[in-house]
Amino acid sequence: MNAMTDATTGLRQPRRGRPPKTQAQLSRTAISEAALSVIDAEGTDAVSMRSVSRVLGVDAKSLYHYVEDKGDLLDAVAEHVLEQLRPPESTDSIERDVRAWANEFRRITLAHPQAATLVLTRQLSSTVGLAPVEGILTVLRRTGRSPEEAVHLMRTLLATLIGTLLREAAAGPTFGSEDPTQIAERQSTLEGSGLPQIGLAAPFLARFDRDREFDFTVDLIVRLATTPISPASP
């Protein structure tokens, strides 16, 4: 029998039946932690019921008492990482609150960069998954926006922030470098491309300063979040 979703809570329910005593140490949290260790070491493509069961030293079938399938397993990992998020306390400054949320998202993303795609892009319906959305909407509603306007703005802000964080988590040489030798080599390649704007921008394209890139993104979303609402045209 497959795991089922409770219609009232929307949460996954484990399979019925008691797992063997040798598997009594299993739990959804333990499975999530094991899956996360696989992701940290080998990336999300390496996650499977078999790979996670090997880490736990159990039969792969025993995992189905706690997770429905691989999709549910990946949701569990995303939720497990999001549980480490510490919601910032609200202040009297919308700008400070937006910056605090952005920095908290960055903290949990860079703690497990291989899992960044899971954490930042999976659509979760659990309380853990929705809590950050609630927090951000609360901040944006304080700007005087309607619920619909706050949702549109939140999606725009998150798309901007997520793009920056995913790039930072997976940044390769094509995004630039912080190493002087690699910067010089990349700059030389770009300057020799024959493309005028690429040539002019080469010193900046060759360099990838993670902190500066993140700060630029946060400055942008703060400006978007705090821009006064324009009155509707008659």
Image: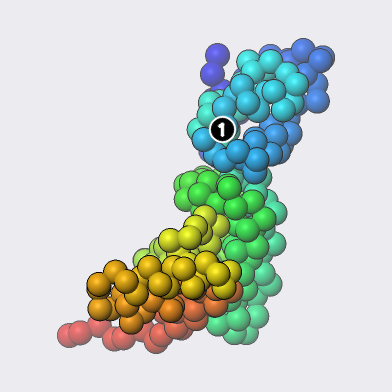
Q: Residue 119: x, y in percent?
A: 55, 50
- Residue 54, above or below 83: above
Residue 194 in view of the camera: yes
- Residue 159, above or below 215: above
| Residue that badge 1 annotates | 46
Q: Kindly identify the residue that appears in the image at 73 percent across and 18 percent down.
A: 58
For this view, does 108 lie left or right of residue 140?
right
How many marks the image carries: the answer is: 1
Q: Nearer the viewer, residue 183 or 11?
A: 183
- Residue 209, above or below 34: below
Q: Kindly identify the residue that appears in the image at 68 percent across and 72 percent down.
A: 89
Task: Please identify the quarter of the rendering in which residue 91 is found.
Answer: bottom right
Q: Which of 188 and 109 is in front in this view?
A: 188
Report the quarter where the N terminus lies: top right
Q: Determine whether the residue tagged by mark 1 lies in a helix, strand or loop.
A: helix
Q: Residue 199: x, y in percent?
A: 32, 77
